[in-house]
Image (cartoon, rainbow, N blue to C red):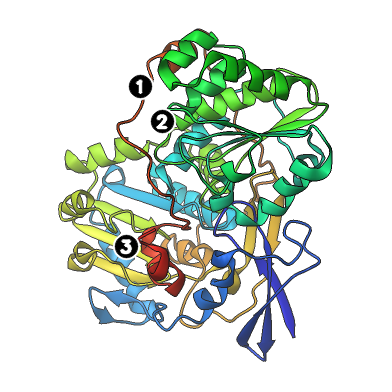
Amino acid sequence: MIKKSKCLFCSLGCGVSFRTEGDKVVALDYDKADPINLGALCPRGHYNLELINHPGRLMEPQIGKRKVSWEEAVAFIRQELKLFNKEEIGCLVSCLLSNESALAAARMAQALGIKNILTAGAAADLEAYEGNKWQVSGANLATLETVEQSEALLIVGDLLSRSPVLAKRVNKVKYGKRGNKIIVIDPNQTHTTWFATNHLACKPGTEAVVLAALAGELPYTEAENISGVPSAKLQQAAEEFRVAAMGTVIYVPQSKKQRNDLGVYYAKKLAAASPNKGYLVYYLFGNTLGVNTIIDREAPDHPTYHELLAKIDRGEVKSLLMFGEDISAGHAELQKRFRMLKFVVFAGHFESESPAIYDNSIILPLATQFEGGGSYLLADGTIASCQPVAPKVGSETLTNICGFLAEGRLDDKVITDHSLINKTKNESDALAEVGKIEPAEGSTGKPITYFGNNHLVSNFFWYQVNKNG
């Protein structure tokens, strides 16, 4: 039997199929009917099979290193959480989890009185999401169909390392009609700049400056002084994009870009500045839009990531629930902070890489989208639904885990509005901020294609052979 699902190793949302024999998933298949990828998968997509059948998957809850039953684990967590004031508990929800998981976590936090709930994802993703919330009149999300129909694509960053399956569509634009343009803003030569008809090789970290100039918000001469891109090239690129009958700005959040929030804001400004233009932001974590939108709606006054860390430093937050993401993995400074915590609950697919986790914690085996299903908000604003393709062997969905911890007191109302919560950005403030951007030292280096975060992907063979570039 063939069962279909979605790859969430980026926010493109490619369809992926599996061959099953009874309850066992035995092989990967290709969903040629899926409108996003038409059966194509990048190297990461092929490792969805390994995610299901990996021998290192968590199968039983653990108190420290001791394996226990779900009943004992849940009872112990309930008991421990009652030792803390509500203000002393923090909750992190991974941007790889489903909309239903995010909603359950938010409702659990409400039931337990936890105010310190926020999302966990790539820092660049979260910064870009904040910029996406800044309202720009006339800025509309593009679709994959409008990308293909574009006469000009303006790509910020290495899109084809983030979402390699889009290469076919980029290629179709480049060669679909004489005069079509592929404008790429990136300090490096990359997979994506290879397709460029106009490569704006800016100084590292100054992409937002270039976008502000192309959008007509920053003088070309000032942008040249900061970014190093000649005024004539900036003016040429702006005109190429403006005169195109249809065009799309595609922004790729990356850690080496300074102020991803301003980058997305000016990408939206550029898309709104001339007719028949749209924009897309391709996030690293598959459900960045969905999880953040839900947490924003359910807990509008939630702290930021840095505010949470400050509360841990001051001893105000003493217990932490981490759902789907061990933010301390690979970060020595964060692991020092974790040793200050009195109690940690980590729900994940694999054991934590952080030794600090096991000193004072409970580990819970978490179901993936392939075992738990759920819905996900993709980069273009469409909602993808996944049905389970494999049984939950030892693991549980976050929805069920949150129900256990809230002792069944979850509000079961469904969120139907997934639109962004718009905020206002003062234009003069934005210009002042973008004008203060300074180039980063050195180069952004050779790109590495990875997904999720290193805690998740370090379990896969694909990552092991590519981690050194």
Query: Cα distance, mark 3 to mark 2?
Result: 36 Å
Please tell me how crowded label 2 is: few (under 14), some (14-19), or many (20+) other residues with Cα within 10 Å.
Answer: many
- Horizontal placement of 198 versus 144: left or right? left
Total numbered labels placed on residues in the image: 3
Mark 1–mark 2 CB contact (< 8 Å)? yes
How far across and how far down the image is residue 47, in percent?
54, 72
For the N terminus, the image quarter is bottom right
How far across and how far down the image is residue 418, in percent?
66, 42
Residue 137, above or below 69: above
* Callout 1 secondary element: loop
Identify the residue at horizontal 44%, vertical 40% (top origin): 124
Q: Which mark is residue 345?
A: 3
How far across and how far down the image is residue 88, in percent?
26, 46
* Residue located beneath label 1 in the image: 438
Q: Amino acid at mark 2?
A: Gly
* Callout 2 secondary element: loop
Query: Cα distance, mark 1 to mark 2?
Result: 8 Å
Mark 3–mark 2 CB contact (< 8 Å)? no
Observer-side mark, 3 or 2, equals 2
Q: Which mark is residue 261?
A: none
* Residue located beneath label 2 in the image: 205
